[in-house]
Image (cartoon, rainbow, N blue to C red):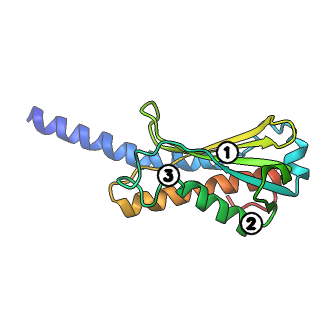
Amino acid sequence: MLRLAKCILFAGAVLGLAAFSPSLTAQRKAAPVNSSSAPVPAPILQGKKAFISFELGDVSSFPSTYSGGPERAYNEFFQGMQAWGRYELVADPKDADVIFAIRFVDTPGLSNPQIRVGITDSRGRVSLWGFAEEINGAFRKKSRDAAFSAAIDQVINDVKLLVQPNDAHP
């Protein structure tokens, strides 16, 4: 009887966590990118040309955990930024107003892997802004791949919210 009670209590706890997890995730994603309304650095807002830099992140997750290779985050981010069209993407950082550096991070200290993007002023090489989005866990590779792409989409939306807060789609 005591064993049955423990099982019921455990099942209730698991169901309770499952019920509240989506709302916690929604709350996290609903937070504004610039919650303090601090001024956004001028090169980000006024820049016309951008260079996208691929920072080699953790490569051990490819191809076993996610499809593709270590450059997958770069490729998807580049395509998304190109589709947005806000910045003219250039092949040489010397021609850019801002540099977006993208990196996939999966270190033991993190609960979930992350996609990180740093924005740098191309003239002075000063860090201007940064974003990090977690990749939600999943059991099936197809679902992990979808979560990876969703994190890339979210970080692109973070940039949109920063640059054009009224035009982004959260």
Residue 14 at x, y percent in the picture: 31, 43
Q: Eyeballing the image, is 128 above or below 169?
A: above
Amino acid beneath label 3: Pro
Residue 78 at x, y percent in the picture: 66, 60
Label 3 with label 2: CB-CB less than 8 Å: no
Give the mark nearer the N terminus: 1 vs 2.
1
Dot label at residue 83: none
Name the front one of labels 1 and 3.
3
Residue 66: quadrant of the picture? bottom left
Q: Residue at x 29, y 43 (%)?
A: 12
Q: Secondary structure at mark 2?
A: helix
Residue 88 at x, y percent in the picture: 82, 63
Name the front one of labels 1 and 2.
2
- Can residue 164 be seen from the camera position used here? no
Residue 168 at x, y percent in the picture: 75, 60
Q: Mark 3 packing: few (<14 Cα in 10 Å), some, or many (20+)?
A: many
Dot label at residue 31: 1
What residue is shown with label 3? 70
Q: Residue at x 48, y 43 (%)?
A: 113
Label 1 with label 2: CB-CB less than 8 Å: no
Amino acid beneath label 2: Trp
Q: Is 158 placed left or right of 49 in the picture? A: left
What residue is shown with label 2? 84
Amino acid beneath label 1: Ala
Give the mark nearer the N terminus: 1 vs 3.
1
